[in-house]
Amino acid sequence: MASQPLLPGGGSKPKAKHTKLSMVYGADEYLEHLSKKYEEYHELAALLQASPDGGHDADQAKAATAKTAGESKAGGMLALDVDDDKRSKKTKRAIPTPNIPEPMPSNLAFMFTKISPEQKMYMWNIYTLIFVAECLNIVLYWAMLHYGPSIGISFGLATGIYGTIMICLCIQNVYILHDVIHGATFPPYEWQNYITHPFADFFSLPWMDIIMEHNRHHNSTFDLLNHGEFGWDPASWLYVLQEWTWEWYGWLTVPLVPFWHYAGASDTGCLFAILWWCKFPDAGPGGKCDKQFYKKWLPVRVKYV
């Protein structure tokens, strides 16, 4: 049951060719879309290939890496920081390998089942639904403030209703943002790149930068108790105030962690965006900006911000 898609198949109907005017992707068209996206963003393909299991779209990433071998440069941000023996320079631990049970117990099989194209599109449909609900909640808040006093809804009550709904929606937004990063990286439609975290901060990272920095985080830190074991981890500064919890002064710094989040240090915050933009992409020869910066990443960032 776990290996079945969340959405029913289309039976034996012939495949319809997807065009720019089409409103709905099919599974085959979406797979083709993924392959093209991995070729376009070959940096992500290279980053996923450096991870122990090759990522959730290992086949597409591997094919894209092979096809764009001349363009991809495995710089510091796209490779694990290991010594000549392929061990961490920091801890001397070997790169972890996936511990997949053999034979696979039937009750665990669902944990190792790759997400189908139908499931990926389903996840983006739910993501879109959450975004629409967040927007409608703002409209509801306006309506309660405008018409509420005439029917006994005070400012406090309206704000409480709005806040409760928005908190629940934003929590689900964070959950699905993380799940989509790891399971359905590229949205079926271009406009969905702009609905992933619009209420996060005054400005923040575009969706593609979010994907890159989060995968960089996982490639650097396999063990959450040992940040940056295999290279620079962009999330390290988020945890810096809690890295010494075994020391007495940890009692003074740990309570500041939520405020550091609120200041914009989290993945979707404005301070984090500045940090990542200063680090990626890797510098080109002579310390100059890499050609991909002007060709691809700068337009993506300008268009989003």
Image (cartoon, rainbow, N blue to C red):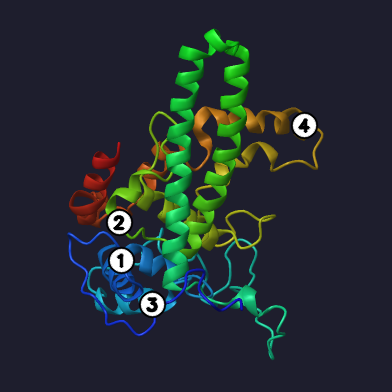
The nearer-to-camera label among 3 and 4 is: 3
- Labels 1 & 4 near each other (Cβ < 8 A): no
User: Mark 2 sits on what residue?
Assistant: 189
Q: Residue at x 32, y 76 (%)?
A: 28
Give how far across and how far down residue 130 sits, in percent.
48, 44
First in residue order: circle 3 vs circle 2: 3
The span from disc 3 to disc 1 (Cα, nearest Å) is: 12 Å
Asked which secondary structure carries label 1, the reply is: loop
First in residue order: circle 3 vs circle 1: 3
**Direction from residue 221 to residue 246 in the image, left or right:** right
Give how far across and how far down residue 154 sits, in percent.
60, 11
- For label 2, count other residues whose C-alpha is less than 10 Å away and answer few (under 14), some (14-19) or many (20+): some
First in residue order: circle 4 vs circle 2: 2
Q: Nearer the viewer, residue 1 or 70?
A: 1
User: Mark 4 sits on what residue?
Assistant: 249
Whether residue 198 is visible here, answered yes or no, is: yes
User: Mark 3 sits on what residue?
Assistant: 10
Asked which secondary structure carries label 2, the reply is: loop
The span from disc 3 to disc 2 (Cα, nearest Å) is: 21 Å
Q: Residue at x 55, y 39 (%)?
A: 170
The span from disc 3 to disc 4 (Cα, nearest Å) is: 60 Å
